[in-house]
Image (cartoon, rainbow, N blue to C red):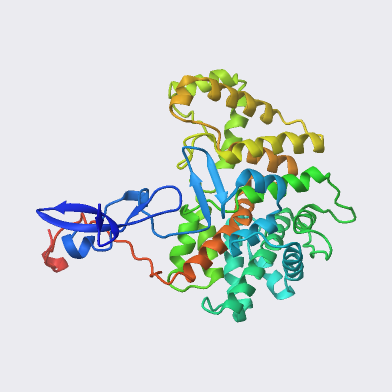
């Protein structure tokens, strides 16, 4: 209905009627604005996991899980993955428009200029234990950037935010390459001017002393594509964490470090490693993939199907088809024969042809083939989540900047429904039973 020109929902609570305005979206779900709910009724919305609660409006990313649609700033992910580059997509997410060629080249030059880490900063890696989880080191290094670059901290200073954006994008691949090399016991390498973003990252990660790092173009293209596919995904756990921390006017580094912490959880950033574990189990146990999928249907103890289904997508994850193509292309170009890829394709075929999985909408997601590609490139499983963080960085930055510039923005402060004990009186320890 309408009230005073606004579309509203009329809610009756204990005989009292209140009107709640509707926030319209350009696509997808609209939102019921619950601002008056507590003041008018004394109640709050109860939504565990915030699965039905919109905490913001956003222009960055649109997902239609039923139709398998993912768009960055309106551009279909399929088109960006085929035609764009990671840095161009980063600029699209952050600025809102695809850049002109001259703008993109200027941006690439600025990022290239800032990829170097000072010797003082490099000392961070020497004091971290070699056995430390890469995500722990990554989060610590990002936090330390706030100490090394104080001129870029003010979230309300546009120039400072632009500098922090460039520094984050430029130094993240260098930091991740250093984390890997430190764990391998290899000397740290400097970025090389004139190389592309992806080429520099790969060389700094894998080049061995006295050797040239040479891989086919498909290697770089696949890595670039994977980063594009992970660049943003609406209000997921880590992105919501970045926004929540930033809502307190925390600087970009501290906010992104919070996103890294959220991503480190196995329910968020560790899915592709879990897929490899599943495929390895099928291979090592000698079980036929069809029999494994039967055990999944029978809910056999200890058997879990990883890399299928998604909290948002109820049809085929649009990123999964792209990753599958990249997996085949890069393994062929590298001359790698991976039995796990063959097993993965058999598992997928069973799922796509079996009514049990079709009815439950258990389709492959982006994580199903990602680990296979990273493994073929030479990344150990422990580095999969840092790679996810590198890809997601533009989205975190874009969402943080959008939140900072939102005139209606407020510090995040969710409510709760208290279920504990009512008031009790203190009893001295000597009088307690």
Residue at 42% x, 54% y is: 25
Describe residue 149's horizontal placement relative to residue 256 as left or right: right
Q: Residue at x 82, y 64 (%)?
A: 192
221 or 384, which is in the foreground? 221
Q: On screen, 114 above or below 214? A: below
Percent position of residue 168, x then y: 64, 67
- Residue 108 visible in the snapshot: yes
Q: Quadrant of the C terminus?
A: bottom left
Q: Quadrant of residue 424?
A: bottom left
- In-front residue for pair 231/380: 231
Q: Could you tell whether 336 is left or right of 348 in the image?
A: right
Q: Position of residue 347 (x, y in %)?
A: 59, 25
Is residue 23 or residue 80 the one in the foreground? 23
In this orientation, does residue 133 appear?
Answer: no
Residue 2 is situated, as x and y percent measured from the top left of the image, at 26, 55
The image quarter containing residue 144 is bottom right
Whether 395 is drawn above or below 430: the answer is above
Q: Looking at the image, how many numbered discs can be counted on the residues?
A: 0
Question: Residue 19, located in which quarter of the rendered image?
Answer: bottom left
Residue at point 32%, 49% (across, down): 48
Asked if residue 27 lies left or right of residue 416, the reply is right
Residue at 70% from the left image edge and 55% from the top image edge: 180
Horizontal side of 284 relative to 222 (left or right) equals left
Point out the residue furthest to the bottom here.
151
Q: Position of residue 296 (x, y in %)?
A: 48, 24
């Amino acid at each position: 209905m309408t009230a005073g020109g606004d579309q509203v929902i009329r809610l009756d609570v204990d005989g009292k009627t209140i009107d709640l305005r509707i926030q319209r979206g350009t696509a997808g779900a609209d939102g019921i604005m619950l601002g008056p709910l507590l003041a008018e009724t004394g109640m709050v919305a109860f939504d565990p996991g915030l699965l039905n609660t919109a905490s913001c409006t956003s222009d960055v990313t649109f997902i239609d899980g039923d139709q398998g649609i993912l768009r960055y700033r309106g551009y279909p992910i399929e088109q960006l993955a085929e035609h764009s580059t990671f840095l161009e997509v980063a600029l699209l997410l952050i600025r809102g428009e695809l850049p002109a060629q001259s703008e993109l080249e200027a941006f690439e030059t600025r990022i290239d200029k800032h990829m170097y880490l000072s010797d003082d900063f490099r000392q961070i890696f020497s004091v971290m234990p070699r056995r430390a989880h890469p995500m722990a080191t990554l989060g610590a290094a990002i936090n330390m950037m706030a100490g090394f670059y104080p001129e870029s901290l003010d979230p309300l200073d546009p120039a400072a935010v632009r500098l922090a954006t460039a520094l984050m994008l430029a130094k993240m691949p260098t930091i991740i390459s250093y984390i890997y090399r430190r764990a391998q016991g290899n000397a740290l390498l400097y970025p090389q001017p004139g190389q592309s973003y992806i080429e520099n990252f790969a060389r700094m990660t894998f080049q061995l002393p006295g050797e040239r790092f040479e891989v086919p173009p498909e290697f770089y293209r696949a890595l670039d594509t994977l980063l594009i596919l992970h660049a943003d995904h609406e209000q997921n756990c880590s992105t919501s964490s970045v926004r929540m921390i930033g809502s307190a006017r925390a600087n970009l580094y501290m906010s992104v470090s919070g996103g890294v912490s959220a991503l480190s959880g196995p329910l968020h950033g560790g899915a592709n490693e879990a897929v490899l574990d599943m495929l390895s189990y099928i291979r090592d146990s000698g079980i036929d993939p069809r029999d494994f999928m039967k055990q999944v249907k029978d809910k056999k103890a200890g058997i879990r199907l990883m890399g299928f289904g998604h909290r948002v997508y109820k049809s085929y994850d649009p990123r999964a088809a792209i990753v599958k193509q990249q997996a085949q292309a890069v393994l062929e170009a590298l001359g790698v024969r991976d039995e796990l890829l063959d097993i993965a394709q058999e598992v997928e075929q069973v799922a796509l042809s079996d009514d049990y999985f079709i009815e439950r909408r258990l389709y492959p997601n982006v994580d199903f083939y990602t680990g296979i590609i990273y493994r073929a490139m030479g990344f150990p499983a422990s580095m999969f989540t840092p790679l996810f963080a590198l890809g997601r960085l533009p989205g975190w930055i874009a969402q943080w900047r959008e939140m900072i510039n939102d005139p209606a923005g407020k510090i995040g402060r969710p409510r709760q429904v208290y279920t504990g004990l009512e008031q009790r009186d203190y009893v001295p320890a000597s009088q307690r039973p």
